[in-house]
Amino acid sequence: MYIADFFKDVLENQAENDNLKMVENKFFSLSKNAEAQKLICALKDEPLFFDDENFYRLLSLDEILDAEDDMGVSFKKKGILPLIDCEDNDFISYDFKKNNWCKFNVIEETKFKIRQSVLEFFKQN
């Protein structure tokens, strides 16, 4: 499955579940962003790898809940939530403070490629 197809399906069909409460208890409320809510609810116990030419891996629920300890980054303090591993220490992340999406490098701790929708990262040009 390709990541754009996966997200399109999730954004149209995903129902709320306990994942959302667990992530919001650990980080922030996602009430401002329906995309972030639905993506969190789509998380599974294992990461999900995609068939795209570029490497994409949707993190598992546990990986997100443990992200600060595992990656050594204060995501809550920075106001971001990593969701998709893009290789080279880059993660597509939801920015709580700005209510948008970005790529975040966990080594340099920098945000780049700011987008209004997560789908904008996967549009074919």
Image: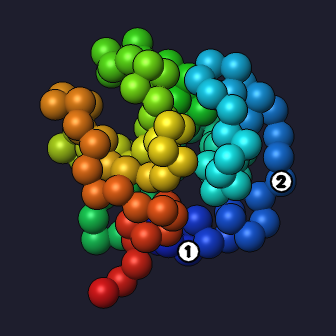
The correct choice, above or below, for 46 with respect to 120 in the image is above
Task: Indicate the secondary structure of the residue bearing disc 2.
Answer: loop
Total numbered circles: 2
| Image location of residue 102, percent across then percent down | 37, 50
Disc ID at residue 110 = none
Relative to 52, 62 lies left or right:
right
Quarter location, residue 107: top left
Q: Residue at x 38, y 66 (%)?
A: 121
Outermost residue on the front side: it is: 98
Q: In the displayed structure, would residue 124 be above or below residue 46?
A: below
Labelled disc at residue 5: 1
Task: Decide which of tag 1 and tag 2 comes sooner along the chain.
Answer: 1
Q: Which mark is residue 15?
A: 2
> How far is the residue under mark 1 from the one under mark 2?
17 Å
Residue 22 lies, in percent from the top left, at 71, 24
Q: Residue at x 50, y 37 (%)?
A: 97
User: Is residue 6 positioned above or below 112 on the image?
Assistant: below
The amino acid on which the numbered mark 2 sits, given as a three-letter code, is: Ala
- Left or right: 56 with respect to 116? left
SS for callout 1 = helix
